[in-house]
Amino acid sequence: MADGEVVAYRVCRDYLTIAWESGPLNFSGSFVLVRHYIQPGEKESSGLHFYTLYMHLAPYSAYEAEAENQWVIQDTLRAYSEMDWLTAKLTSESTSPQIAGHMPKGARVEWDPADSNLNATGNNKRKYGLVALKGLPEDTSSTLTPGKRYWVVVDNNNIKSAPGAGPGWWRQLLPPAKEVMVFDKTVSLSSPFAIKAGDPIGHMGYYQAPKDGVMRRDIRCISNARAWMITWKNS
């Protein structure tokens, strides 16, 4: 939403449950609180501190389950869009798709090598994978859009397994950090750390209602004891 600093969080190891007549229901208790400061005018008096609270984030266990499909690009690679790749294949076996852009070294992607629909062999006999771009390295720009899928070459160690899944701000809480991650407790950081607008905060958590369940994340913007709430839901 805006540049800021993480000041508090709770990362649950797994989903929490609540008793219900038809059986226990799952929900996520994970959250992160980010503090921001803006100064639209020249005078300091125009400055404003506000907070964004991200609730119902996916627990740690959700990232453990998908860690095997997280990868890091090891070199700058040509990237092809899904549509251009398909169009080229349908047009002629000798037709090469147009380059959508370049995926920089250090980019984080998601790819399941066991899924045949995400694998292909190019005209150059190289192995390609359809990867979802999850994030770019810091201070790196690209014409590619995070969240979209692109075809890139995946042989010859051009991609390697990511050292760990989870949003980037978690890395600030890994050893040898002075304040390491604590699970299942609300933690107020004595030394907040910076986070940039656009950095991943976390996946949506699963929220189970008595009749159905949805993936959801609750985001609130708070300032001067007034709160504005925006809620996104995806089933």
Image (tube, rainbow, N blue to C red):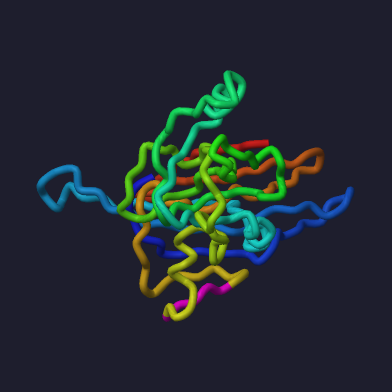
Foreground pick, 12 / 63: 63
The quarter in which the N terminus is drawn is top left
Residue at point 53%, 58% (across, down): 157
Total numbered circles: 0
Residue 181, magenta (yes or no): yes
Residue at point 48%, 78% (across, down): 175
Foreground pick, 54 / 201: 201
Predominant secondary structure, magenta span: loop
124 up-or-down from 169: above or below: above
Which stretch did the figure color magenta? 178-182
Foreground pick, 94 / 73: 94
Horizontal and vertical percent for residue 126?
Answer: 56, 44
The answer to which quarter of the image holds residue 211 is: top right
Q: Is residue 222 visible?
A: yes
Horizontal side of residue 16 vs 228, given as left or right: right
Horizontal and vertical percent for residue 50?
Answer: 34, 51
